[in-house]
Structures are given as structure tokens and as C-alpha cells.
Amino acid sequence: MPSPYSYDLRIRALKMIDEGIPITQISKLLKISRDTLHRWKNRRDHTGDVKARFGYQTGYNHKISDMKEFQKFIDQNPGKTHQQLADLYPVEMSAKTMGVWIKKLGYTDLATFF
């Protein structure tokens, strides 16, 4: 994800809007899309500020948090299918996800059906 525009640039663009300069002209001058300028203006009108949002990107939460514990679980349940292992594992996951994590451990492919 690209980094947000600086706060100073946002303030400068909004001052230009307040001075009556057309948004199209500001867009060309500062090389910022018109939609972005409209969003900044609306955000300022609603919240009173135009700071960039942060903290909303949570990233991907992996199903397996402790690989050693997972490897121990796999070693304790030999000969079971991916679906059986997925059903037994305390965290809910699909058989496909179970197979992907088993492969990450370096084990050969276990049976997926009888």
C-alpha cells in the first residue's frame, strides 16, 4: 500500500480550495486526483481534520500461531486424512488449509481420502 500524502500537503490543498481555486486546477498543480481532494474536503467538513487514517490494516491472521505445537499435533496423529486432522485441531480450518500447513512443515503429502 502506498504511503499517504503528507499532512502539510493536505492542508495546503484545502487552503487553495478555500481561496476559491478550482479543484481541477489544484489537481493538476499538485498532481493529486480530484476524488482525493473531494475526500479530504469532506473529511475536514465532517471531522474537522484531514489526518491520514492509520491502524485499520490488520494484516493476515494465520490459523497456526505455534509451529512447534502444530508439529507435535501432527506427529501424535499419524495416518489421518487432512479432513480428520482439521476436525481434531482446536482451531477451525479447512482440510485444504491443514494440507498447506503440513506441507510447510516439510512432511510428505498425507492421504486426503480413503
Image (cartoon, rainbow, N blue to C red):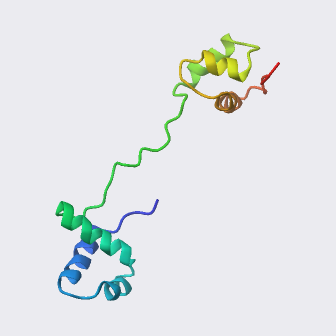
Residue depicted at 31% across the width and 69% down the height? 39
Viewer-nearest residue: 46 or 7: 46
Q: Residue 53 at what x, y percent from top left? A: 31, 56
Residue depicted at 38% across the width and 86% down the height? 28
Left or right of 53? Residue 62 is right
Left or right of 101? Residue 92 is left
Quadrant in which residue 90 is drawn: top right
Q: Residue furthest top?
A: 76
Please determine whether, in this image, residue 77 is positioned above or below residue 83.
Answer: above
Residue depicted at 30% across the width and 60% down the height? 52
Quadrant in which residue 25 is drawn: bottom left
Viewer-nearest residue: 86 or 64: 86
Residue depicted at 24% across the width and 88% down the height? 21
State whether residue 106 appears in this view. Answer: yes
Q: Residue 43 at what x, y percent from top left? A: 25, 64
State whether residue 72 appears in this view. Answer: no
Please determine whether, in this image, residue 7 is positioned above or below residue 108.
Answer: below
Q: Which quadrant does the C terminus fall into?
A: top right
- Number of numbered discs overlaid on the protein picture: 0
Viewer-nearest residue: 88 or 101: 88
Q: Residue furthest right?
A: 114
Please determine whether, in this image, residue 79 is positioned above or below residue 28.
Answer: above
Q: Residue 20 at what x, y percent from top left? A: 20, 87
